[in-house]
């Protein structure tokens, strides 16, 4: 069962997806001030394309943004595409 987790390190952080204890994908971000994060990169390990791992990480970022009352700037082309295709995530843009 895959699980999305968050790691923070000062003004940077990343969401990652693990499956059976192995990291299968990562999405990095940086804080822009105290009220925004910029998603700058998303990748999944070879063989995981099409499994929805990237979208699950974006969904976790949206959940995090809602909890912290912050906005997301999706500079990563993949994350931007997910936001474009998912109207229910746009409240955090």
Image (spheres, rainbow, N blue to C red):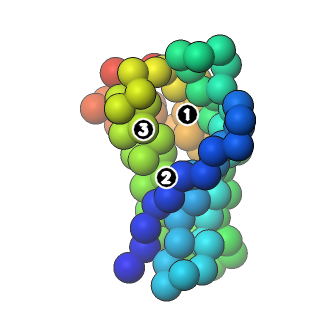
Of residue 19 and residue 8, the one placed in the foreground of this image is 8
> Residue 38 placed where, x, y %?
64, 28
Q: Is residue 2 depicted above or below 63 in this figure?
A: below
Q: Residues within 10 Å of mark 2 (few under 14, many from 20)?
A: many
Q: CA distance from mark 1 to mark 3?
A: 17 Å
Residue 28, quarter of the rendered image: top right
Q: Which mark is residue 88?
A: none
Check the image and name the residue furthest to the front: 10
Of residue 27 and residue 85, the one placed in the foreground of this image is 27
Check the image and name the residue furthest to the left: 88
Q: CA distance from mark 2 to mark 3?
A: 10 Å
Judge left or right: residue 57 versus residue 41: left
Q: Tell me whether the residue at label 2 lies in contact with that at label 3, contact meaning CB atoms closer than 8 angstroms.
A: no
Q: Sequence order check: which comes first, mark 1 or mark 3? A: 3
Judge left or right: residue 54 versus residue 47: left
Q: Is residue 13 depicted above or below 21 in this figure?
A: above
- Which element carries disc 1, helix, strand or loop? helix
Q: Sequence order check: which comes first, mark 2 or mark 1? A: 2
Q: Is residue 85 depicted above or below 33 in this figure?
A: below
How many marks overall?
Answer: 3
Q: Do we see residue 76 in this rendering?
A: no
Residue beneath disc 3: 64
Residue 69, quarter of the rendered image: top left
Of residue 31 and residue 41, the one placed in the foreground of this image is 31
> Residue 70 placed where, x, y %?
46, 21
Residue at left 69%, top 75%? 46
Residue beneath disc 2: 57
Q: Sequence order check: which comes first, mark 2 or mark 3? A: 2
């Amino acid at each position: 069962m895959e699980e999305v987790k968050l790691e923070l390190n000062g003004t940077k952080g990343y969401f990652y997806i693990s499956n059976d204890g192995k990291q299968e994908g990562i999405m990095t971000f940086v804080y822009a001030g105290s009220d925004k994060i910029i998603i700058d990169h998303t990748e999944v390990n070879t063989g995981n394309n099409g499994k929805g791992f990237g979208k699950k990480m974006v969904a976790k970022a949206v959940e995090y943004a809602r909890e912290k009352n912050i906005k997301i700037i999706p500079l990563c082309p993949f994350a931007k595409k997910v936001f474009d295709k998912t109207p229910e995530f746009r409240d955090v843009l």
